[in-house]
Amino acid sequence: MDSDQFWAAPATTGGLKSYYRQYGQRWQQTRIELVHFRNDESIAQWQQQWLQQGLAIAQQAIALGQQPVAGFSFYTWNAAEFLALIRFLKQSCPELLIIAGGPHVQQAEDYLFDDPIDLISLGEGEASFQELLDCDGREQWHLIAGLAYLDKDGQLHKTSKRERTISLDELPSALDVMPLTDAQGEPLYESYSYETSRGCPFKCAFCEWGTGAIGGKMYQFSMARIRKDWELIIGAGVKDIWLADSNFGALKEDQAKAELICELKEKTGLPSSFATSWSKKHSPRVQEIALLLNRNGLLPHYQLALQTLTPKALELSNRKNMASNKYEPIAKEMAKAGVPIAAELIWGLPGDNLKDYERNLDSLLATFPNINIFGYTLLPGTEFYEKRAEYQIDAIPVAGYGKAKGEYVVGCHTFDRNEGIEGYFLISAHIILNHGHVMPLTVRYLALEGSVPVSPLLRSILRALIKGFEDQLVDFDLSDRMEVYEHRAPLYLAMLRQPAHCFSIIEATIFDWLSSHQASAPLIDAVSKTLQLDHAFCPRYGARQFYDIEVDFDGKAISQTLNEMDLPNKKMFSQPRHTLNITSPGGVGDFMKDPDGGSWVKGEFVEEQAIKLDEVVPVQIP
């Protein structure tokens, strides 16, 4: 199951079918149907098809002494929907055998005792699924490695460990059994999530990647296999390839993979984008790959996964980040080269606290042009999940996931629930004001200048904005900080409908903050002028528009300097009054409805000769 935002070919289940076709003893007598859902609506439609057609097929198989099987690949984003669907299937056909796999169900006891799941695949699933389909029934389950189930006495039974596949080319391609185009030759999917390697050498306590489910040592497919598959994907017109690798750039062969994707882009114009999880350790090879992809228009972002800078949280997470004197020059160099570099952080890790976290965030805001902050979701099968009692982890269900075993961590032995929830409020403020491109330049200027704290200011601004727009958002309890976190998009859209009101609130809050921290007059003046640029560049409703603003500072130099992660000099803030020409693509409320997409529709400078006079819109920016 995917989502409206991400629609990719079902490579995981396609791989299971392809494996059984090659190695299964009963392939000729077995019918395997791939079912792939885009959203909740498509699940409801399929349920009707099941009642009208599929149920009769399953019942006919049972009457003939055959065993119908339904397999589910579980991830955090589909667990609640799949659990509900499994209950529906079992109610309509109790004899249907249900097997679940995937990283989200590796804590098998959390599911087998409570949910109508018959078996869970532990670790890699291809061979286990094949052997299950080929066995003669329940009495042979104990002979199959990598399974968990309840025995006849209702006790949990786990079979022997499923050893990992070392030579990945032994796994046949999902593309052997999975069409990518319709009858007219048009692509069926927008994206393809592709593995070039398996495994992760790190044992982060919050992550499933390096655990026994996937394994620590990295193995990879051959370049011949990758080329064959990528040429098929591109040939079908699939526009995006997103890697499911854990540490792209860590293996020497990753350079050749990057060169291959650039070669395909040059020859065919596809893929449009190429995304991956980058190596946890930055190296000259990683940097070379990132620069290569950026030159070829294939780098939506290059992300350094720092997660936290708090020493205790790093220790408990089994992580060790590179020193700041190493990542700071990397960030600045890549920012100057136009590479969209970002730092990745997690709030809520045991060992952290909000005071240290915000101080570290302020440092990173002065280093990285982009920062992605995620709330820590406690995942089954991870070290922190197993040690939740030891670390006094306090968690609440992830919105919309119900019994998905996905939980926001809001407290632990180093921060209480109030502090934990305030951290989520900080994330909301950062996403709305920075990611939403409401005031990123002002935030960066203050972080670079360094005399006043920035992260607490973001929280203060968000509180003021909530108060200023609460009468327009009566369907939400904006006094509930977690509800703000989960429903930040409506607030963001309300702000952009009234940009003048929005920025008057922001300006007043900033000036109060600067005054309370005894800021100098030159600092207040510089912040005021930088905020004018943010107001001019802020995403807008409507169609593309051109507009002029009158300023008495060098807006282009200030913007460029800040984008290169340098502090503008005083001279830039004192210039003869002149006009800046700006264009905005519009699109807010149309195709852009969430602050995470704010940078896609931000304004930008435009040369005067490129503007038609009848397109100019007068804009009042104080």
Image (cartoon, rainbow, N blue to C red):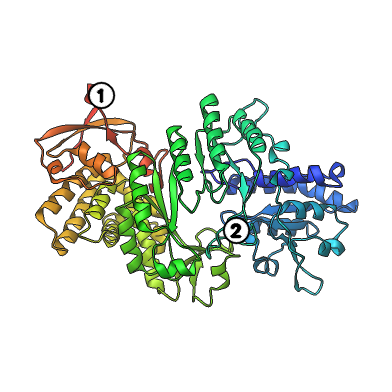
Give coordinates of residue 91: x percent, y percent.
73, 59
Front-most of residues 493 and 290: 290
Q: Is residue 390 visible?
A: yes
Q: State the mark number for residue 80.
A: 2
- Name the residue tied to disc 1: 611
Which quadrant of the figure has residue 469?
bottom left
Viewer-nearest of labels 2 and 1? 1
Which quadrant of the figure has residue 549?
top left
Residue 275 vertical placement versus 280 (above, below): above
The kind of secondary structure element at disc 2 is: helix
The residue lying at 70 percent from left, 57 percent from top is: 100
The residue lying at 53 percent from left, 47 percent from top is: 248
Give coordinates of residue 487: x percent, y percent.
41, 55
Residue 84 vertical placement versus 276 (above, below): below
Give coordinates of residue 398: x percent, y percent.
51, 62
The residue lying at 53 percent from left, 65 percent from top is: 205
Which quadrant of the figure has residue 410?
bottom left
Q: How crowded is mark 2: few (under 14 residues within 10 Å), some or many (20 or more)?
A: some
The residue lying at 66 percent from left, 40 percent from top is: 222
Q: In this view, does 475 lie to the left or right of 74?
A: left
